[in-house]
Image (cartoon, grey):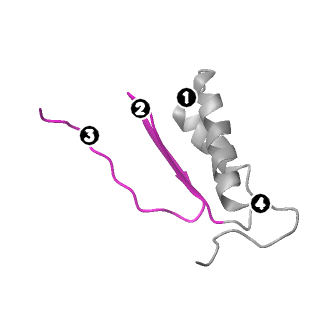
């Protein structure tokens, strides 16, 4: 399967990278950063040449951010 990540000796393996990235964002949220701020800050961790998108879901909030636009949708009402 082709990798979505650049091939480089000093670049972590994709599975490790994704986990570390998610853990970093989760830590910000645990420390009371709001999801909109976290989504914005997360995008800045990547080189400008990398097209990246992120969706954050918490129990009560939703946020997203992307460099080149990213289709997404969320439910605004839940019927039980």
Report helix, strand or loop for mark 1. loop
Report helix, strand or loop for mark 3. loop
Q: Could you tell me how far apart the alpha carbons at marks 3 and 1 are, in whole angstroms?
A: 18 Å
Q: Could you tell me how far apart the alpha carbons at marks 2 and 4 are, in whole angstroms?
A: 27 Å
Q: Could you tell me how far apart the alpha carbons at marks 1 and 4 are, in whole angstroms?
A: 23 Å
Q: Could you tell me how far apart the alpha carbons at marks 3 and 4 are, in whole angstroms?
A: 33 Å
Looking at the rendered structure, which numbered label has been put on residue 47? 4
Residue drawn at x 41%, y 32% is: 61
| Residue to which mark 1 is pinned | 34
Pointer 2 with pointer 1, Cβ within 8 A: yes
| Residue to which mark 2 is pinned | 61
In-front residue for pair 10/56: 10
Pointer 2 with pointer 4, Cβ within 8 A: no
Pointer 1 with pointer 4, Cβ within 8 A: no
- Label 3 Cα crowd, 10 Å radius (few <14 / some 14-19 / many 20+): few
> N-terminal of the two: label 3 or label 4?
4
Query: Does residue 39 sit above or below 66 in this rendering?
Result: above
* Numbered range of the magenta stretch: 51-80
Q: Where the N terminus falls, by quadrant? A: bottom right
> N-terminal of the two: label 2 or label 1?
1
Q: Main secondary structure of the magenta part?
A: loop
């Amino acid at each position: 399967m082709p990798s979505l990540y650049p091939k480089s000796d000093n670049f972590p393996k994709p599975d490790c990278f994704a986990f570390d990235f998610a853990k970093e964002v989760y830590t910000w949220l645990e420390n009371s950063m709001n999801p909109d701020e976290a989504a914005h800050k997360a995008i800045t961790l990547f080189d400008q040449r990398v097209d990246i998108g992120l969706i954050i879901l918490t129990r009560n909030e939703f946020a997203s951010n992307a460099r080149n636009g990213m289709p997404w949708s969320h439910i605004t009402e839940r019927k039980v």
